[in-house]
């Protein structure tokens, strides 16, 4: 499962910024004026689970 797959399944998409040594996901709802909604938190939770499954390390 990938972030794109997860996003497609819940029909809510993150902006992904892939760099040489890291990936940044920005999640907001365009229709809500780029504010956070329940769908954003749901997708963030799912992305966090994928990151943990791959044993990735957070930058912060």
Image (cartoon, rainbow, N blue to C red):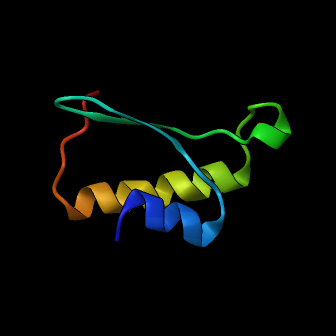
| Up/down of 14 relative to 20, above or below | below
Based on the displayed image, in which of its 4 quarters is residue 22 positioned?
top left
Left or right of residue 37: residue 45: left
Task: Give 43 or 19, whichever is nearer the viewer.
Answer: 19
Based on the displayed image, in which of its 4 quarters is residue 60 positioned?
top left
Left or right of residue 52: residue 25: right
Based on the displayed image, in which of its 4 quarters is residue 18 positioned?
top left
| Up/down of 54 relative to 16, above or below | below
Question: Residue 47 appears at what percent x and percent y?
Answer: 42, 55
**Residue occupying image coordinates x 29% and y 55%:** 51
**Residue occupying image coordinates x 64% and y 57%:** 12
Left or right of residue 12: residue 25: left
Question: Residue 6 appears at what percent x and percent y?
Answer: 48, 66
Question: Residue 3 appears at what percent x and percent y?
Answer: 41, 58
Left or right of residue 35: residue 47: left
**Residue occupying image coordinates x 23% and y 65%:** 53
Image quarter where the N terminus lies is bottom left
Task: Give 7 or 40, whichever is nearer the viewer.
Answer: 7
For the view shown, which residue lies furthest in the right direction? 32
**Residue occupying image coordinates x 71% and y 53%:** 38
Task: Give 21 or 42, whichever is nearer the viewer.
Answer: 21
Counting the numbered discs, the total is: 0
């Amino acid at each position: 499962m990938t972030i794109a797959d997860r996003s497609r399944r819940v029909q809510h998409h993150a902006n992904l910024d892939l760099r040489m040594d890291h990936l940044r996901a920005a999640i907001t709802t365009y229709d809500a004026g780029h504010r956070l909604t329940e769908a954003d938190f749901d997708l963030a939770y799912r992305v966090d689970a994928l990151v943990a499954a791959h044993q990735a390390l957070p930058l912060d």
